Amino acid sequence: MLKYLIQKEFKQIARNSFIPKILIALPLMAILVFPWAANQEITHIQVAVVDKDHSTYSRRLTEKIAASTYFRLTVWTDTYENALSNVEAGKVDIILEFPSDFEKQLLTQNRAKVYIASNAVNTMKGGIGSGYMTSIIRDFADEIRTETLPVTYSHPSLSILNSQLFNPYGDYKIFMIPALLVMLLTIICGFLPALSIVSEKETGTIEQINVTPVKKTTFILSKLIPNWILGFIILTMYMLLAWLVYGLIPAGNLIAIYFIALIYIFVVSGLGLVLSNYSSTVQQAMFMMFFFMIIMILLSGLFTPIASMPDWAQTVTLFNPLRYFVEAMRMIYLKGSHIMDLGKQLLALSLFALFFCGWAVMSYRKTN
Amino acid sequence: MKQFFAFIKKEFYHIFRDIRTMLLIIGIPVAQILIIGFAVSTDVKHVKTAIYDPSHDTSTRQIIQRLGAGEYFDIIRILQSPGEIDDLFKKGEIGFAVVFSENFAGNLYHTAGIAGQARNDNAASIQLIADASDPNQGTVATAYASNIISGYQQELMQQQSIPLMIIPEVQMLYNPSMRSSYNFVPGLMGLIFILICAMMTSIAIVREKETGTMEVLLASPVKPVYIIVAKMTPYFILSWVNLIIILLISVYVLRVPIAGNLVWLNVFSLIFILVALSLGLLISTLVNTQMAALLASGMGLMMPIMILSGMLFPIESMPKALQWFSCIVPARWYISGVRKIMIEGASVRYILTEMAVLIGMFIAILTISLKNFKTRLA
Amino acid sequence: MLEINTNIEKPYTPTPPLGGRGGVIETIDLTKCFGNFTAVDHISFSVEKGEIFGFLGANGAGKTTAMRMLCGLSKPTAGQGFVAGYDIARQPEQVKKNIGYMSQKFSLYEDLTVKENMRLFAGIYGVKENLILPKIDETLSKLGLTAEANTLVKKLPLGWKQKLSFSVAIFHEPQIVFLDEPTGGVDPITRRQFWKMIYEAAERGITVFVTTHYMDEAEYCRRVSIMVDGRIDALDTPANLRAQFHAENMDEVFTKLARKATRIES
């Protein structure tokens, strides 16, 4: 029985004028285009310098900032107002202002103030920009101290050494590729089943199925398995392209990736089928799935760290299957974690899969 | 004109009779903005941190205390040996580790060094190790930690009256309390509006095509343009209601203030809603089934918009080619405009570009879809 | 009005009294309510094996609801029903094994071909794999649809679709086939062909339970029940009904009965 139903699903997908196109276009975009875009690195912070002093030191510090890789000096002006209007136009991220007595204060009082105003709408950019700026200013102070006071003197000094593990070149693409794969599988294996049962309700074909002795489990499996096979194909295609285009090979075991993806696809497809069972129109099913999809994706740690969320939200993420899948995929793909390290994720995903697939079978009603 | 209003009335009946769907249309954006607005922060905070401190002196304790005081680092482990670090990283238990050198305070005060060249063998040193499998979190955490440590050093220097000090005074513009929702809420608005609006209109028209009622409408003496406008009107009004609810929520619940002009914010948002509705219309002229319409507008648009709109990933960090490519994403313009007018309080002349682009998009999409619509059904 | 083809008309034989055991369909006070609305109101009747049973009624009289209960698609609110010996409330899946169903709205897969639809449902009903293909060929040639075997169903004209639906409903040789307005919207020639197929099925021993709007078709049935406002107001052979209501044809019988209806047509 199952065999015939699965064949039917594949024929329907293949004959659809739209689905095959999107099944090819979306994964291609996800591997060829999106990794370049999905980048949160803060670079090229645009600086406006308000120099009211026009002194040697103010000019030297300005040059030092312009020469740094983090900053790009875009505006050089006399008034703060002018600089600020450039911030509002989106041309400047951070303003450095030298007061008119900057050099005089520095040489006579041995200390001088500068003002930094950083656009903090994007808090990370604002924070990091001002951080980089202060450290350049500190370096500059060290520099001029060495020049003007050639004698060695004692002052507290310490050195900071940085090391970045697992992705030492900081290539964001490598970090995002497993995440985009997770998102892709979620979207495709979630939306298709969400519409599948309810669209049969709308066309009426479900009636012809319900009047047959087909078992509920068989029918639900006939909706799950094609999705699983599609997910499998997309997963393979995606990893192959990740290797061909970016030379990225999973650090961990391939079988572990397939195994955990297999379980995960049952989770999202099961959720989709549950929503499909409870909806009476495809529109309702789509809206419901859209709701869960956005929440699941944004509360999974896929794009923003879970640790930055408030406590209640961190608790909510414990009930988000996507969270465990992202964790597991990143651990295997990037850190080479062994499947034994993933006990928690495997257990959670298996429970979710059982729960949603079981619910999908229960909520599918052949008799009203 | 009379017929036109009769059509609009009919569309309203359609929507308001289906209470369940209407509740979804209103409820979903509100719930999403609420949950995500509260929960999601793009900033890097509460990084789980382990410390290895063989010196146990005043200086290391002061530095550890400062690291742990802010909301950036949560010190969860004090290690006995640096060998444990690798394992903790692999298991994902920590994201950051700080390793102090031995005899830290002693070296800190007694190393006579030439300023700026402290790296000799006996220098006090701190090693910052970040899990860069998330490179962003890695660099940001490192930057925050370096800042805290340098701040400490700076203070020590001030106590000792070091010559030639430059003291930076930092001010955070528009968002002094550093809340990442200021950045995120406009992005969320852009994402949700465009998807919900596109889904609503695309399905409304395809449904009539599928059931065949579209032919009845077209057989009537009303011009196709009016039919389309009549179809879009209720959704336009519904979206406006959504906009107002969402703005109220962001001001009173999420505490994201509207710093700019409310009227212009509304005008700008409504232009964007028009773009989104016409996008749904365009999709409906290209597909024949409700399922395809929904998959195109919901599934097909979700990922590109999330990634290319600047909602999560700053446009200026993208390669040039993609920056150009992102220009065709309407949400990109909306999000950038809302950030300026709503958060920064910029006056309307700073968003003229965004507004012009959106109006242009609206006209272009509408023209193409009307053309498609006529040739398809005529 | 359609001419009755006398070749296929069956002689009338008396049936056991209503509610008697031994019918292939038995109902006792079968009732279905939706909230306050009683769609089917305590109906009791019995259908014999091999019989063609006409189930008549105006729109909204409750025909489809009653039929859906008998098919195990809808749970009765009260009363009992047995189809092929199984309780429709407690053993709906057993019922489904023994019946075929053709719904009012065409509900085969439009995006599958004629052959694929037949294969799918044959497979679901557990027809042995090696028997499926020969039987499909046989059925298609009987229907004259051999040339259309690989045509997508959505491209077929309505009459052909209906014939295909019927063939699918009886493909697995069920004991009973339920037909919900099978000839709605098709031309008179196709209707006649359709009834020929119904008679052939009945000759093979398949019980046919059919609802219809066409009173001329009622004359083809061995027995006819007429539903008004959820109740069965009359049940007998067409000839007896004509005599009982002093009517010239079934149309008149129906009109006389339906006039009593108080429900608004839905």
Image (cartoon, helix red, strand yellow):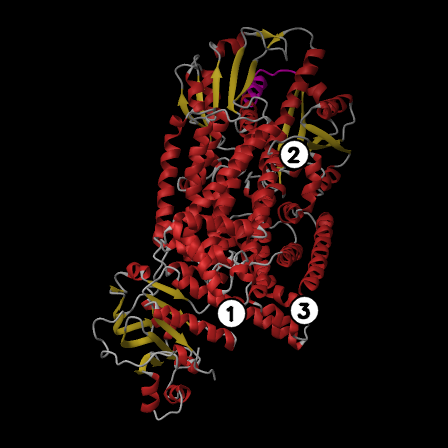
Asked if residue B189 is positioned above or below residue B139 in the image, the reply reads below
Numbered disc 2: secondary structure: helix
Asked if residue A186 is positioned above or below residue B153 in the image, the reply reads below
Is residue B153 inside the magenta stretch?
yes
Q: Chain of mark 3?
A: B
Q: Respond whether the residues carrying marks 2 and 1 are from the same subunit.
A: no
Amino acid of disc 1: Gly
Image spot of residue B7 (x, y percent): 61, 72
| Residue at 63% over, 23% down | A135
The 10 Å Cα crowd at callout 1, few under 14, some 14 to 19, many 20 or more, is many
Numbered disc 3: secondary structure: helix
Label of residue B226 in the image: 3
Judged by depth in the image, the label closer to the viewer, 2 or 1, is 1
Label of residue C159 in the image: 1
Amino acid of disc 3: Tyr
Image spot of residue C65 (x, y percent): 36, 71
What residue range appears in magenta?
A: B150-163
Amino acid of disc 2: Ser
The reply, left or right, for residue B364 in relation to residue A172 is right
